Image (cartoon, rainbow, N blue to C red):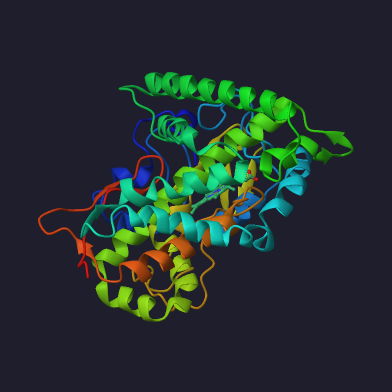
Amino acid sequence: MSSPQAGTMPVFCVAHMLESWDERHPQAAFVELSGQDAPARPDGTPVVARREEMIEFLRHPAVRATDGVHYNMGAQRPLIPLDLDGETHRKYRRLLDPLFTPKQVARLESKIRARTNALIDAFADAGEAELMFGLCATLPTHIFIDLLGLPLEDLPIFLEFKESVVRPQGATVEEQQANSRAAGQRMYDYLADVLAQRRAEEAGDDLIGGFLTAEVEGARLTDTEIVDICYLLVIAGLDTVTCSLSCMLAWFAEHPEERRRVVSQPELLARAVEELMRFESPVPLAHRWVTEDIEVAGRRFAAGTMVEVLWAAANVDPAAFPDPLAVDLDRARNPHVGFAAGPHRCLGSNLARLELRVALEEFHRRIPEYEITPGQEVVYTNYGVRAAVHLPITFPVS
Ligand code: HEM
């Protein structure tokens, strides 16, 4: 979930510079990178691409989420908990983790099913659909608006915000940073207004209601803390699920045999979601800062260095995943890092898994046979988060 502001180059990651890079299928370039000893960007930024080295690196106490200057995704203050470290970080995770356990998120299952079906209703009789637009972009936003307890008519505000901070417009890094910060400011203002309004009402049975009454170490959360949590949740919870769902639907559209297997045996979907999370790695990378000279897995990192951590490469590291370029829906051992690893591992992975599984189950129940519209191609972007941004499908209508 890093934005270009965390780095200094417009090229989104070092694998992009390899000859084997292919925007549609970047996995081979990531395998190549995971085979390199001590890969680095042209400006010298070290890249961690091997799974084992990555796990050890992320556990090191001298490895930090920020340098105290660069914050993720248009934020002007540290995002809670992503831009915090050590005990402060743990303090907020203790508050947030119980809200996103499998049991807690399971309460949303029927809502996710209903929202998925309502979106499919809009195109089910047409025999064709643009799935990024018709399903992937809207579903997670609907779910999130429900979760936070906000009005559905505010949907365009969220879609515009996450697009502007995850893929900011601009010809230079400076322009992109300025656009991303401007979008961030609009979200700060929006959330501050929401909180002022919600404080005047009785606390509702939703996340914002919960934050208004929650206590951390005996003290209520301040408005700034709640805004900084919600700001991150909006970005972390929307685009990631949108992009992952688009990659998975694109993959199933192009692999009819495997699709027919999960259509006839939906119980295979949970494992299929894990394997596609590994293979597609929608969130490709993050940045970390090293606070003192350290050695990890025989490699030295100097104090003050920014390091690029490539989840997408670790997920196809042949030392961790035999035959890494094969999508094996039966892969039994799958310790992928698609939801990150270390202290900042994804807070919302249980929710994401539920949304993806339920959306795929419902989609396949309603539309079991589909293909990429003849004469058209899936268009992928790998900038920010990997997604199938153009996903036109055709299907028979009974
Ligand atoms: C398929 C969907 C998702 C993927 C691939 C994903 C991936 C990730 C990754 C790679 C990180 C680590 C980021 C870093 O270290 O820079 C992360 C962190 C995080 N994710 Fe997710 N995520 C997904 C869905 C969600 C959802 C639905 C939520 C909302 C509840 C969420 C909330 C968070 C939060 C709050 C963090 C920061 C955790 C911390 O710093 O302790 N994510 N996610």
Q: Is residue 175 above or below residue 6?
A: above
Q: Nearer the viewer, residue 59 or 38?
A: 59
In the image: residue 393, left or right of residue 13 = left
* Displayed quadrant of residue 55: bottom right
Q: Residue at 74% across / 42% down in the picture?
A: 210
Q: Position of residue 280 (x, y in %)?
A: 38, 58
Q: Residue at 33% across / 60% down in the picture?
A: 249
How many numbered marks does the figure carry? 0
Q: Is residue 288 visible?
A: no
Going by the picture, which residue comes out furthest to the right?
A: 218
Q: Nearer the viewer, residue 6 or 262?
A: 262
Q: Position of residue 374 (x, y in %)?
A: 12, 59
Q: Nearer the viewer, residue 211 or 311?
A: 211
Q: Position of residue 388 (x, y in %)?
A: 31, 50
Q: Residue at 43% across / 28% down in the picture?
A: 8
Q: Position of residue 353 (x, y in %)?
A: 53, 61
In the image: residue 344, left or right of residue 40 = right
Going by the picture, which residue comes out furthest to the left?
A: 375
Question: Quadrant location of the C terminus?
Answer: bottom left
Q: Is residue 167 visible?
A: yes
In the image: residue 152, left or right of residue 147 = left
Q: Nearer the viewer, residue 313 or 166?
A: 166
Q: Is residue 108 above or below residue 291?
A: below
